[in-house]
Amino acid sequence: MNKQTIITSLLALVAMAGQAKTFKTIKNPVAMACVNVANGELKAREVIMRDTATTVHFTIEYEKGNNFRFAKESYLMDEDGNRYPLRSADGIALDAWVQSPESGVTDFTMHFEPLPKKIQIFDFIEGDGNRAFKLLGIHDKKYKIKYPTMQELADANPWTVPDDWFKTDTIIVKGRIKGYDAEQFGFTSLECFFQNVFEKDDATLVLDIAPDGTFYKKFQAGYPICQRFYTLESKVGFSEMPFFARPGETIDITVRKDAGGRYVCVYNNGGSRDAARWLRTRDEITDVLFPLMLFEGSFDEGNVLADNMWQNVMYRLQTVSRREHYTPMEMQLALAYVQTRFAYYYMTYAMNRRYALMKQNESAEWQNLADAKSYYHLYRIDFDNPLLFVSSDFPYLLNRIQYAQPATRALFSTAGQQRMDNYYAVLREMLGSKANTLIAQLCLYQQMLTESRKWQTDKESKYTMFSNTFTHPHVKARADEFYSRLMAQTELATPIPDAPMADLIRSLCAKYPGKILMIDFWGMGCGPCRYAIQESKELRTGIAKRDDVKLVFIAGERTTEGSDAYKKYVAEWLANEETVCVINADFTRLQELFQFNGIPHYETITPDGRRVRDDLRINGYDNFEYELERLKEKLK
């Protein structure tokens, strides 16, 4: 190519650049949701759509002094799932930690590959990490969005729930991570917080990864579940493995890189294969609901926000399901998943609002929170739908409804059969139902499990009071099974299984021979844990002088030495007491050993190294003396 040709080509390129056309400018666009910006908010100030690039002017409001960063792998995504990668950024460094200034406000600009002219709504996604910043549903506020109804989506995708939906059987999750290397990946196990709502104990699961990348886990479930095994320690792009499984199934999963170098889960059989499209994209739908759980405004404002969130999530469901070609089964699972997550986030917001107003318990807003009719957004939810059980959020939703302010007032204001009747009446009003729904009955079932830990006498009459209210055949059957197991209990304590971390417990028994151990499982990130420790300090001074019992405090940290914050806290509040710090992975194994998910959690170990059954264990500090003496009397 001669010099003249080169000059001509350069001039042509300059001319083309100068002719770039701006075909749309959106001033002050709105978004459906800002996601994962935990200490602030990301906003789009302006969108300029040209035929050569799409430019977005952003503002991030972030707590001053805190650090954030944006990945160079950021992109825009349209409703068809097409990506428009980031080309460059002005006013911010990419892949570098940026400290939020004194004002807490940072303005910056990003230039992406051009969006087509027809695009009306799009997302900004900051890479493919699990905690990536997202600004979803960006659009011109003048654009009129047509929101579908849940009934329209359901009617267009008819599917019948199988008759054996509630069935207790084992589930096996097995497979292989291709190219796995423990040091390179940063983890040797994954964990899953799983809870069967018909059982009294939780069931944290640990999935060990063999050196060759293979894994195998067998556990029991009482209904189909959508869960995930995950890790917070990953050094690579892979950190979670979602799955959908029905009791009795073996789910085979291959984790490998796709053509773009991203780790993906390939489901080779079973329920996960049948629902693979939904598993891969379910969070793309429900991410728009996340701001509802974190909202701090008044209850009236929260109800307005909830209405907007519901419309947005219906729109997202319609868009993603069309793009991914959901089957009718996947659509019905997605609809149930959306209902569960919406209701859980809504009730979590209401719970947080209740705590925020506890010192204003005479205010109009407080009274509003106590009124069952105020929770009218729950009327959208089909609380008789067994598909709701699939979601990992379901046990938490159940807890939020069970202990909602109107419900607890009804349950604890009277006694005997009257409180059952009052409880159901409030739940009918709260859930918008004329009958006692499946979920309402399950709330009382859960209350039965909780209270049964304290049943010392008249167990049959106490059980009958609950069971007579259960009209759903599966709830009634599981309640009868529970009562049969309860009455069959003869041993006060059982041997600790030969499982990982059991040796730690045995070593503590050997260290304090002849003593009953009360183990307090706690953590620095748990407010109730620290509150219980601080409030019991004086009581524990007296306990330390006893020769029949020893308190042991076990926490999980990134290292066995613990963080500086952990060391400082122990020095102030747990000095001269038996404290054990284990790495987080081993703390999870302790959760699996003792079947608990939440903390604080308390276990009691007999002098001969056996685990005391839950209705006799020392359950914290409130009734310590009574519970210890009762146990000692039983152990004679």
Image: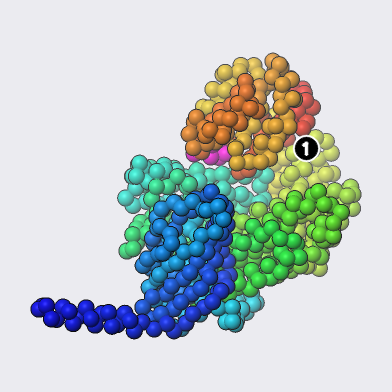
Q: Is residue 169 above or below residue 138?
A: above
Q: Kindly indicate the quadrant of the structure image that contains residue 549.
A: top right
In the picture of the structure, the residue carrying the numbered disc 1 is 454
Q: Give the residue drawn at x 42%, y 82%.
A: 22
Q: Give the residue drawn at x 89%, y 53%.
A: 418
- Residues in magenta? 585-592
Q: Amino acid at mark 1?
A: Lys
Q: Kindly indicate the quadrant of the structure image that contains residue 340.
A: bottom right
The location of residue 318, given as percent across then percent down, is 55, 75
Q: Quadrant of the N terminus?
A: bottom left
Q: Kindly indicate the quadrant of the structure image that contains residue 182.
A: top left
- Mark 1 Cα shell of 10 Å, populated few (<14), some (14-19), many (≥20): few
The location of residue 601, given as percent across then percent down, is 65, 37
Q: Give the residue drawn at x 36%, y 78%.
A: 52
- 272 part of magenta stretch: no
Q: Secondary structure at mark 1?
A: loop
Q: Give the residue drawn at x 27%, y 79%.
A: 14
Horizontal arrangement in the rendering, residue 145 relative to residue 474 (left or right): left
